[in-house]
Amino acid sequence: MADKCHLCLLGLIFLSSLLTGLSGVDDAHVFISSGEDVRLPCNNALPGCKYTTWNYERFRDSAAVELVAGGRKKTDIEKHERLSLESDCSLNIKSVTKEDCGSYICQQWTGPKGQQKQQGTNAHVYLNVLHVSSSEISAGRSVTLYCQLYSYPQVSFNDLICSGGIELFWVNQAGDKLKNSDSRYQISAPGHCIFTLNTTIQNEDENREWRCEVTHRNKVQTSTTYTGKSSVIEIIVKFAVFAVFAAPTVILLQIICDRRAENKEKP
């Protein structure tokens, strides 16, 4: 038990150093919500970025994918259209997805081709993506909203994040934190860095917003909002019901109008 506590403590110290920059000037943590654009800084950049390389690792033991080489982005990778390199060698990613989370490594190389040498150390940027999804939603029915922070690596590192001064929680439109003490909401944490909000959607909830926030030491890092809307299926059903009841009325009015027209035509 003591060994486990000691290991956990070391993990928390490591995480804290990453978040505060004490583990080295080259490390950084970036938090972003899915769908937004993000800029990943390169803290060991050389002027011109001619020898800049960006590599990406989804998991700790996965093979690194080269995104940028020699200051130019690779065109044979799936997300190359969403990537761009700035003049300070930082990497831009448009419309971030939860699959973009992971470790991004900026390197600088100099020298002739085939004899290049790395200049300085690796600049690590850990991208954490906040993503919200939901079960099918319709008025008068229970709905579950899922808020999850995707990190690197996905399992063990999430454990450290959830216990390292970082919090996930749901707030209402007024910014008040939602709690289980409110009989309308049931909040739980069923897995690694995932918080769920269960509630029953009412008619007055149309366009109501619920927001999931990520904070580090009480400072909001990023947030994402879910807006309550009737499902497409529900709208179709309502329209169909309306049509069923409205059709006889329309037909009756048409008959009355036709008979009046006939009576006017009679001498």
Image: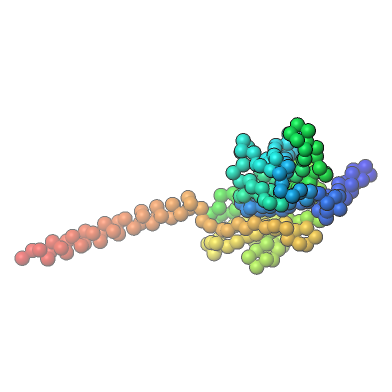
Q: Is residue 162 left or right of residue 186?
A: right
The answer to whether one can see residue 217 in this image is: yes
Q: Residue furthest left?
A: 267
The answer to which image quadrant residue 76 occupies is top right
| Residue depicted at x 67% and y 51% | 86
Q: Is residue 191 left or right of residue 224?
A: right
* Color scheme of the displayed model: rainbow
The answer to whether one can see residue 154 in this image is: no
Say above or below: 62 vs 254.
above
| Quadrant in which the N terminus appears | top right
Residue 265: percent from left, percent from top: 10, 63
Q: Residue furthest top?
A: 114
| Residue depicted at x 34% and y 58% | 246
Q: Is residue 51 left or right of residue 243?
A: right
Number of numbered discs on residues: 0
Residue 112: percent from left, percent from top: 75, 35
Of the pair 14 and 114, the residue shown nearer to us? 114
Of the pair 62 and 113, the residue shown nearer to us? 113
Of the pair 59 and 104, the residue shown nearer to us? 104
Residue 9: percent from left, percent from top: 89, 48
Of the pair 88 and 25, the residue shown nearer to us? 88
Residue 23: percent from left, percent from top: 86, 50
Q: Is residue 138 left or right of residue 31?
A: left
Q: Residue furthest front?
A: 112
| Residue depicted at x 81% and y 53% | 19
| Quadrant in which the C terminus appears | bottom left
The answer to which image quadrant residue 101 occupies is top right
| Residue depicted at x 73% and y 58% | 221
Q: Residue furthest bottom?
A: 174
Say above or below: 65 vs 250.
above
